Protein backbone atom coordinates (compact mmCIF):
# COMPACT_ATOMS: atom_id res chain seq x y z
CA UNK A 1 0.00 0.00 0.00
CA UNK A 2 1.42 3.39 -1.02
CA UNK A 3 1.52 5.46 2.14
CA UNK A 4 2.39 8.61 0.22
CA UNK A 5 -0.68 8.43 -1.99
CA UNK A 6 -2.93 11.46 -1.57
CA UNK A 7 -6.02 10.37 -3.45
CA UNK A 8 -7.77 7.17 -4.45
CA UNK A 9 -10.92 6.24 -6.33
CA UNK A 10 -13.00 3.64 -4.52
CA UNK A 11 -15.93 1.89 -6.17
CA UNK A 12 -18.23 1.33 -3.22
CA UNK A 13 -21.44 0.69 -5.12
CA UNK A 14 -23.59 3.21 -3.28
CA UNK A 15 -23.93 6.77 -1.98
CA UNK A 16 -20.90 8.14 -0.17
CA UNK A 17 -21.62 9.12 3.45
CA UNK A 18 -19.97 12.46 4.22
CA UNK A 19 -19.24 11.75 7.90
CA UNK A 20 -18.94 8.78 10.26
CA UNK A 21 -22.40 9.48 11.65
CA UNK A 22 -23.89 9.14 8.15
CA UNK A 23 -22.55 5.60 7.74
CA UNK A 24 -25.18 2.89 7.89
CA UNK A 25 -25.56 -0.87 7.97
CA UNK A 26 -28.41 -2.10 5.79
CA UNK A 27 -29.78 -4.60 8.29
CA UNK A 28 -33.16 -6.22 7.58
CA UNK A 29 -34.98 -6.24 10.96
CA UNK A 30 -36.74 -9.53 10.22
CA UNK A 31 -33.54 -11.33 9.23
CA UNK A 32 -31.66 -9.80 12.15
CA UNK A 33 -34.21 -10.93 14.72
CA UNK A 34 -34.50 -14.40 13.21
CA UNK A 35 -30.79 -15.11 12.87
CA UNK A 36 -29.04 -12.89 15.44
CA UNK A 37 -26.21 -14.76 17.19
CA UNK A 38 -27.55 -18.02 15.78
CA UNK A 39 -26.91 -18.11 12.03
CA UNK A 40 -24.68 -16.04 9.71
CA UNK A 41 -26.37 -13.69 7.24
CA UNK A 42 -25.29 -11.04 4.77
CA UNK A 43 -26.16 -7.34 4.60
CA UNK A 44 -25.21 -4.18 2.71
CA UNK A 45 -23.51 -1.12 4.19
CA UNK A 46 -22.43 2.44 3.36
CA UNK A 47 -18.97 2.49 4.89
CA UNK A 48 -16.72 2.01 1.85
CA UNK A 49 -16.61 5.67 0.83
CA UNK A 50 -15.53 7.02 4.21
CA UNK A 51 -12.33 9.05 4.20
CA UNK A 52 -10.97 7.11 7.17
CA UNK A 53 -10.59 4.02 4.96
CA UNK A 54 -8.59 5.70 2.20
CA UNK A 55 -4.97 4.50 1.88
CA UNK A 56 -3.40 7.68 3.25
CA UNK A 57 -5.76 7.63 6.24
CA UNK A 58 -4.97 3.98 6.97
CA UNK A 59 -1.25 4.75 6.84
CA UNK A 60 -1.70 7.52 9.39
CA UNK A 61 -3.75 5.17 11.54
CA UNK A 62 -1.11 2.43 11.30
CA UNK A 63 1.57 4.86 12.45
CA UNK A 64 -0.39 5.48 15.64
CA UNK A 65 -0.17 1.78 16.53
CA UNK A 66 3.64 1.62 16.48
CA UNK A 67 3.96 1.93 20.27
CA UNK A 68 0.99 -0.32 21.08
CA UNK A 69 2.11 -3.88 20.25
CA UNK A 70 -0.87 -5.41 22.04
CA UNK A 71 -3.17 -3.60 19.65
CA UNK A 72 -1.96 -5.13 16.40
CA UNK A 73 -1.23 -8.54 14.92
CA UNK A 74 0.66 -9.12 11.67
CA UNK A 75 0.97 -12.55 10.11
CA UNK A 76 1.57 -14.28 6.81
CA UNK A 77 -0.87 -16.36 4.81
CA UNK A 78 -1.82 -19.82 6.03
CA UNK A 79 -1.04 -22.69 3.67
CA UNK A 80 -4.59 -24.03 4.04
CA UNK A 81 -7.84 -23.41 5.86
CA UNK A 82 -7.04 -26.16 8.37
CA UNK A 83 -3.65 -24.75 9.41
CA UNK A 84 -3.30 -24.15 13.15
CA UNK A 85 -3.85 -20.43 13.66
CA UNK A 86 -0.67 -19.59 15.56
CA UNK A 87 1.56 -21.89 13.53
CA UNK A 88 1.55 -19.28 10.77
CA UNK A 89 4.65 -17.02 10.98
CA UNK A 90 3.78 -13.68 12.54
CA UNK A 91 5.49 -10.48 13.63
CA UNK A 92 8.53 -8.98 11.93
CA UNK A 93 6.90 -5.68 10.99
CA UNK A 94 5.27 -2.75 12.66
CA UNK A 95 1.91 -1.81 11.08
CA UNK A 96 3.22 1.01 8.87
CA UNK A 97 6.06 -1.19 7.62
CA UNK A 98 3.63 -4.02 6.88
CA UNK A 99 1.45 -1.66 4.85
CA UNK A 100 4.42 -0.54 2.81
CA UNK A 101 5.27 -4.18 2.05
CA UNK A 102 1.70 -5.33 1.40
CA UNK A 103 2.31 -5.81 -2.34
CA UNK A 104 5.62 -7.64 -1.81
CA UNK A 105 4.29 -10.68 0.02
CA UNK A 106 1.20 -12.24 1.55
CA UNK A 107 0.46 -10.43 4.80
CA UNK A 108 -2.48 -10.01 7.14
CA UNK A 109 -2.61 -6.86 9.28
CA UNK A 110 -5.04 -6.64 12.19
CA UNK A 111 -5.38 -3.23 13.86
CA UNK A 112 -7.30 -3.79 17.08
CA UNK A 113 -9.41 -1.14 18.79
CA UNK A 114 -8.78 1.73 16.33
CA UNK A 115 -11.33 3.74 18.30
CA UNK A 116 -8.72 4.06 21.06
CA UNK A 117 -6.28 5.63 18.61
CA UNK A 118 -8.51 7.82 16.44
CA UNK A 119 -11.66 9.72 17.41
CA UNK A 120 -13.17 9.26 13.93
CA UNK A 121 -13.18 5.50 14.50
CA UNK A 122 -14.73 6.07 17.92
CA UNK A 123 -17.56 8.00 16.26
CA UNK A 124 -18.04 5.24 13.70
CA UNK A 125 -18.20 2.49 16.31
CA UNK A 126 -20.71 4.36 18.45
CA UNK A 127 -22.86 5.20 15.40
CA UNK A 128 -23.03 1.61 14.14
CA UNK A 129 -23.74 0.09 17.52
CA UNK A 130 -26.57 2.56 18.11
CA UNK A 131 -28.11 1.47 14.82
CA UNK A 132 -27.90 -2.16 15.86
CA UNK A 133 -29.30 -1.50 19.35
CA UNK A 134 -32.26 0.35 17.81
CA UNK A 135 -33.19 -2.92 16.07
CA UNK A 136 -32.36 -5.15 19.06
CA UNK A 137 -34.03 -3.60 22.16
CA UNK A 138 -32.63 -6.42 24.31
CA UNK A 139 -29.20 -4.81 23.94
CA UNK A 140 -30.51 -1.82 25.89
CA UNK A 141 -31.45 -4.12 28.76
CA UNK A 142 -28.04 -5.79 29.03
CA UNK A 143 -24.71 -4.39 30.10
CA UNK A 144 -22.17 -4.47 27.28
CA UNK A 145 -18.81 -5.00 29.03
CA UNK A 146 -16.88 -5.17 25.76
CA UNK A 147 -17.50 -3.26 22.54
CA UNK A 148 -14.63 -2.74 20.13
CA UNK A 149 -13.72 -2.69 16.46
CA UNK A 150 -10.88 -3.77 14.20
CA UNK A 151 -9.47 -2.87 10.80
CA UNK A 152 -8.13 -5.76 8.72
CA UNK A 153 -5.81 -5.13 5.77
CA UNK A 154 -4.52 -8.05 3.69
CA UNK A 155 -2.41 -8.74 0.62
CA UNK A 156 -3.81 -10.54 -2.39
CA UNK A 157 -4.41 -14.29 -2.17
CA UNK A 158 -3.99 -14.67 1.58
CA UNK A 159 -5.71 -17.21 3.80
CA UNK A 160 -6.76 -16.76 7.42
CA UNK A 161 -7.06 -20.26 8.92
CA UNK A 162 -10.08 -21.73 10.70
CA UNK A 163 -10.86 -20.40 14.19
CA UNK A 164 -13.70 -18.92 16.21
CA UNK A 165 -14.05 -15.65 18.13
CA UNK A 166 -15.66 -15.22 21.59
CA UNK A 167 -17.94 -12.34 20.60
CA UNK A 168 -20.81 -11.34 18.31
CA UNK A 169 -19.54 -9.60 15.17
CA UNK A 170 -20.69 -7.45 12.25
CA UNK A 171 -18.14 -7.54 9.44
CA UNK A 172 -18.00 -5.02 6.55
CA UNK A 173 -15.85 -5.29 3.43
CA UNK A 174 -14.44 -1.90 2.47
CA UNK A 175 -12.08 -2.54 -0.45
CA UNK A 176 -11.16 -5.57 -2.53
CA UNK A 177 -12.67 -9.02 -2.59
CA UNK A 178 -12.91 -11.50 0.24
CA UNK A 179 -14.35 -15.02 0.41
CA UNK A 180 -15.68 -15.62 3.90
CA UNK A 181 -16.41 -19.22 4.94
CA UNK A 182 -18.41 -19.40 8.16
CA UNK A 183 -20.30 -22.10 10.07
CA UNK A 184 -23.11 -21.81 12.63
CA UNK A 185 -21.73 -21.66 16.19
CA UNK A 186 -23.05 -25.12 17.14
CA UNK A 187 -20.53 -26.59 14.67
CA UNK A 188 -17.86 -25.99 17.31
CA UNK A 189 -17.91 -28.87 19.79
CA UNK A 190 -18.46 -28.31 23.49
CA UNK A 191 -15.00 -29.66 24.26
CA UNK A 192 -13.43 -27.15 21.84
CA UNK A 193 -15.40 -24.34 23.46
CA UNK A 194 -14.55 -25.50 26.98
CA UNK A 195 -10.83 -25.69 26.20
CA UNK A 196 -11.00 -22.10 25.01
CA UNK A 197 -13.04 -20.58 27.82
CA UNK A 198 -11.05 -22.19 30.64
CA UNK A 199 -8.20 -19.87 29.66
CA UNK A 200 -10.23 -16.85 30.69
CA UNK A 201 -8.75 -14.40 28.17
CA UNK A 202 -9.77 -12.73 24.93
CA UNK A 203 -8.19 -14.59 22.01
CA UNK A 204 -9.16 -16.85 19.12
CA UNK A 205 -10.41 -20.42 19.58
CA UNK A 206 -9.04 -23.46 17.77
CA UNK A 207 -11.30 -25.73 15.72
CA UNK A 208 -10.63 -29.09 14.08
CA UNK A 209 -11.30 -28.22 10.42
CA UNK A 210 -11.48 -31.88 9.36
CA UNK A 211 -14.44 -32.43 11.67
CA UNK A 212 -16.62 -29.62 10.30
CA UNK A 213 -19.67 -30.49 8.20
CA UNK A 214 -19.19 -28.80 4.81
CA UNK A 215 -22.93 -29.04 4.20
CA UNK A 216 -23.42 -26.42 6.91
CA UNK A 217 -20.86 -23.98 5.55
CA UNK A 218 -21.98 -20.48 4.50
CA UNK A 219 -19.78 -18.85 1.84
CA UNK A 220 -20.04 -15.08 1.42
CA UNK A 221 -18.38 -13.44 -1.58
CA UNK A 222 -17.76 -9.97 -0.18
CA UNK A 223 -16.92 -6.81 -2.06
CA UNK A 224 -17.15 -3.12 -1.14
CA UNK A 225 -20.53 -2.39 0.41
CA UNK A 226 -21.17 -5.99 1.51
CA UNK A 227 -20.94 -7.47 4.97
CA UNK A 228 -22.01 -10.33 7.20
CA UNK A 229 -23.16 -11.08 10.71
CA UNK A 230 -20.97 -13.57 12.55
CA UNK A 231 -22.47 -15.19 15.66
CA UNK A 232 -20.33 -15.74 18.73
CA UNK A 233 -18.18 -18.90 18.50
CA UNK A 234 -18.95 -19.36 14.78
CA UNK A 235 -16.01 -21.20 13.14
CA UNK A 236 -14.72 -19.36 10.08
CA UNK A 237 -11.84 -19.03 7.64
CA UNK A 238 -11.18 -16.36 5.02
CA UNK A 239 -9.48 -15.86 1.66
CA UNK A 240 -8.68 -12.62 -0.16
CA UNK A 241 -9.01 -12.22 -3.92
CA UNK A 242 -6.85 -10.67 -6.64
CA UNK A 243 -6.37 -7.28 -4.99
CA UNK A 244 -5.58 -6.03 -1.52
CA UNK A 245 -8.41 -6.20 0.96
CA UNK A 246 -9.57 -3.71 3.59
CA UNK A 247 -12.27 -4.71 6.06
CA UNK A 248 -13.85 -3.27 9.19
CA UNK A 249 -15.61 -5.18 11.93
CA UNK A 250 -17.10 -4.39 15.30
CA UNK A 251 -17.69 -6.98 17.99
CA UNK A 252 -19.21 -7.08 21.43
CA UNK A 253 -19.95 -9.25 24.44
CA UNK A 254 -22.83 -9.01 26.88
CA UNK A 255 -22.91 -10.04 30.52
CA UNK A 256 -24.95 -13.07 29.43
CA UNK A 257 -22.42 -14.17 26.81
CA UNK A 258 -19.57 -13.82 29.29
CA UNK A 259 -21.51 -15.83 31.82
CA UNK A 260 -22.00 -18.57 29.22
CA UNK A 261 -18.27 -18.66 28.65
CA UNK A 262 -17.61 -19.06 32.37
CA UNK A 263 -20.11 -21.93 32.48
CA UNK A 264 -18.14 -23.68 29.78
CA UNK A 265 -14.93 -23.03 31.66
CA UNK A 266 -16.41 -24.74 34.71
CA UNK A 267 -17.55 -27.65 32.53
CA UNK A 268 -13.94 -28.07 31.43
CA UNK A 269 -12.98 -28.68 35.08
CA UNK A 270 -15.82 -31.18 35.47
CA UNK A 271 -14.82 -33.05 32.32
CA UNK A 272 -11.18 -33.25 33.41
CA UNK A 273 -12.37 -34.71 36.72
CA UNK A 274 -14.23 -37.52 34.93
CA UNK A 275 -17.74 -36.07 34.89
CA UNK A 276 -19.92 -35.61 31.81
CA UNK A 277 -21.34 -32.10 32.27
CA UNK A 278 -24.62 -31.14 30.68
CA UNK A 279 -24.52 -28.60 27.88
CA UNK A 280 -25.25 -24.99 28.83
CA UNK A 281 -28.96 -24.22 28.78
CA UNK A 282 -30.16 -27.60 30.09
CA UNK A 283 -30.22 -26.45 33.73
CA UNK A 284 -30.08 -22.61 33.90
CA UNK A 285 -29.76 -22.50 37.70
CA UNK A 286 -26.81 -24.87 37.63
CA UNK A 287 -25.30 -22.83 34.79
CA UNK A 288 -25.57 -19.72 36.98
CA UNK A 289 -23.77 -21.49 39.83
CA UNK A 290 -20.99 -22.63 37.49
CA UNK A 291 -20.58 -19.16 36.01
CA UNK A 292 -20.46 -17.59 39.47
CA UNK A 293 -17.82 -20.05 40.62
CA UNK A 294 -15.63 -19.35 37.61
CA UNK A 295 -16.10 -15.59 38.00
CA UNK A 296 -14.67 -15.94 41.50
CA UNK A 297 -11.76 -17.94 40.07
CA UNK A 298 -10.11 -15.02 38.27
CA UNK A 299 -7.18 -15.24 37.66
CA UNK A 300 -7.77 -18.57 36.02
CA UNK A 301 -4.83 -20.38 37.59
CA UNK A 302 -6.98 -20.78 40.70
CA UNK A 303 -9.45 -22.98 38.81
CA UNK A 304 -8.15 -26.10 40.57
CA UNK A 305 -9.04 -24.69 43.98
CA UNK A 306 -12.47 -23.73 42.73
CA UNK A 307 -12.93 -27.24 41.38
CA UNK A 308 -12.32 -28.71 44.86
CA UNK A 309 -14.93 -26.38 46.31
CA UNK A 310 -17.35 -27.12 43.46
CA UNK A 311 -16.88 -30.87 43.93
CA UNK A 312 -18.06 -30.64 47.54
CA UNK A 313 -21.08 -28.56 46.55
CA UNK A 314 -21.98 -30.85 43.66
CA UNK A 315 -21.71 -33.93 45.86
CA UNK A 316 -23.90 -32.42 48.55
CA UNK A 317 -26.54 -31.52 46.01
CA UNK A 318 -26.25 -34.92 44.31
CA UNK A 319 -25.96 -33.34 40.90
CA UNK A 320 -23.66 -36.07 39.61
CA UNK A 321 -22.04 -33.69 37.15
CA UNK A 322 -25.23 -32.09 35.79
Image (tube, rainbow, N blue to C red):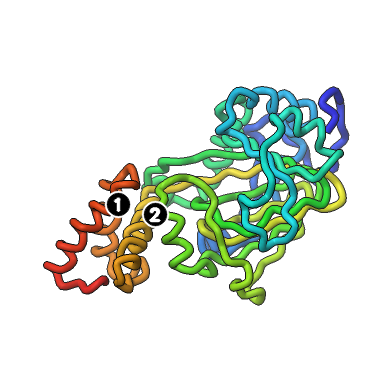
- Examine the image and state in which quarter residue 41 appears: bottom right
User: Percent position (x, y) of residue 5?
Assistant: 86, 25
Question: What residue is at 64 percent from the left and 36 percent from the top?
Answer: 111
Q: As drawn, which residue projects farthest toward the left?
A: 316
Local secondary structure at mark 1: helix
Q: Could you say which is closer to the camera, residue 14 or residue 243? A: 243
Question: What residue is at 85 percent from the left and 29 percent from the top?
Answer: 2
**Residue that badge 2 annotates:** 198
Q: Could you say which is closer to the camera, residue 304 or residue 285? A: 304
User: Percent position (x, y) of residue 136?
Assistant: 48, 52
Residue 279 in view: yes
Q: Could you say which is closer to the camera, residue 225 or residue 287? A: 287
User: Percent position (x, y) of residue 81?
Assistant: 70, 61
**C-alpha gap between disc 2 and disc 1:** 8 Å
Q: In the picture provided, is 313 more to the left or to the right than 299?
A: left
- Quarter the N terminus occupies: top right
**Residue that badge 1 annotates:** 303
- Quarter the C terminus occupies: bottom left
Residue 151 in view: no
Of the image marks 2 and 1, the number of the one nearer the N terminus: 2
Number of numbered discs on residues: 2
Local secondary structure at mark 2: loop
User: Does the CB distance between marks 2 and 1 fall below 8 Å?
Assistant: yes
Q: In the picture provided, is 3 more to the left or to the right than 217?
A: right
- Examine the image and state in which quarter residue 174 appears: top right
User: Percent position (x, y) of residue 294?
Assistant: 29, 52
Question: What residue is at 67 percent from the left and 42 percent from the top?
Answer: 90
Question: What residue is at 15 percent from the left and 68 percent from the top?
Answer: 315
Amino acid sequence: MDCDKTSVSTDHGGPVPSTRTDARLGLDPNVLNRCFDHEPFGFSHELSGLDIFKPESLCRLAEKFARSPRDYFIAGSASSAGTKFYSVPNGGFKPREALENLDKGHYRILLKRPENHDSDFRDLLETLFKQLAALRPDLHRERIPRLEAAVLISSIATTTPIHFDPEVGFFSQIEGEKFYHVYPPDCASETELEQFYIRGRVDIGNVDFSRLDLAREFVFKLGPGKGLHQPQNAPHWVQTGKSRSVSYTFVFQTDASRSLGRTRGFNYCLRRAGFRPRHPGVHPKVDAFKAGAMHAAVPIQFAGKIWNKAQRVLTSRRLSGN
